[in-house]
Image (cartoon, grey):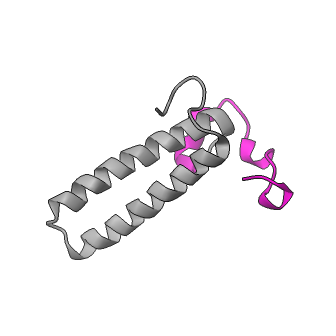
């Protein structure tokens, strides 16, 4: 699904996916702080982290980086997020 030559989702759908899995990653991390031996939660965290990373890479490839982690992948291009519409200008 992710990392094809064309985006598998619209920009808005991809941002929603990134937000959803990012939320899950944070919540699972907090849960694991108090339940460090929960193997099911650890497996779920690994799965969601991988999905988040793939989604961030796909987003960066098609729309520009959202995080510094994915900015280096587009180092030949300028800081594209500055050129995109800001939220108050109708950006996602």
Q: Is residue 35 above or below residue 24?
A: below
Furthest residue toward bottom? 34
Q: Quadrant of residue 39?
A: bottom left
| Residue that appears at 55% across and 36% down | 58
77 shown above or below 13:
above
Q: Is residue 16 above or below residue 88?
A: above
The answer to whether residue 66 is seen in the rendering is no
The count of marks equals 0
Q: In percent of the image, x 52 and y 50: which residue is there?
A: 17
50 and 78: which is toward the camera: 50
**At x 38% / y 50%, what residue is drawn?**
49
In screen coordinates, is 7 left or right of 91?
left
Left or right: 67 as drawn, with respect to 92: left
Q: Position of residue 47 (x, y in %)?
A: 32, 48
Q: Specify whether residue 28 is in view.
A: yes
- Which residue is situated farthest in the top direction here? 5
The segment highlighted magenta reads 67-92
Q: Residue at x 14, y 66 (%)?
A: 37
Q: Is residue 74 above or below residue 68?
A: above
The image position of residue 66, as x and y in percent, is 61, 49
- 81 magenta-colored: yes
Picture coordinates of residue 89, whole percent (x, y)? 85, 56
| Residue 68 highlighted magenta (yes or no) | yes
Viewer-side residue, 8 vs 73 = 8
Query: Where, by quadrant of the figure, is residue 60 drawn?
Result: top right
């Amino acid at each position: 699904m992710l990392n094809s030559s064309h985006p598998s989702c619209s920009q808005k759908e991809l941002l929603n996916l990134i937000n959803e899995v990012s939320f899950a990653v944070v919540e699972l991390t907090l849960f694991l702080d108090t339940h460090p031996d929960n193997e099911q939660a650890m497996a779920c965290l690994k799965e969601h982290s991988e999905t988040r990373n793939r989604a961030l890479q796909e987003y960066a490839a098609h729309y520009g980086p959202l995080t510094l982690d994915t900015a280096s992948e587009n180092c030949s291009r300028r800081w594209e997020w500055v050129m995109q519409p800001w939220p108050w200008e109708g950006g996602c």
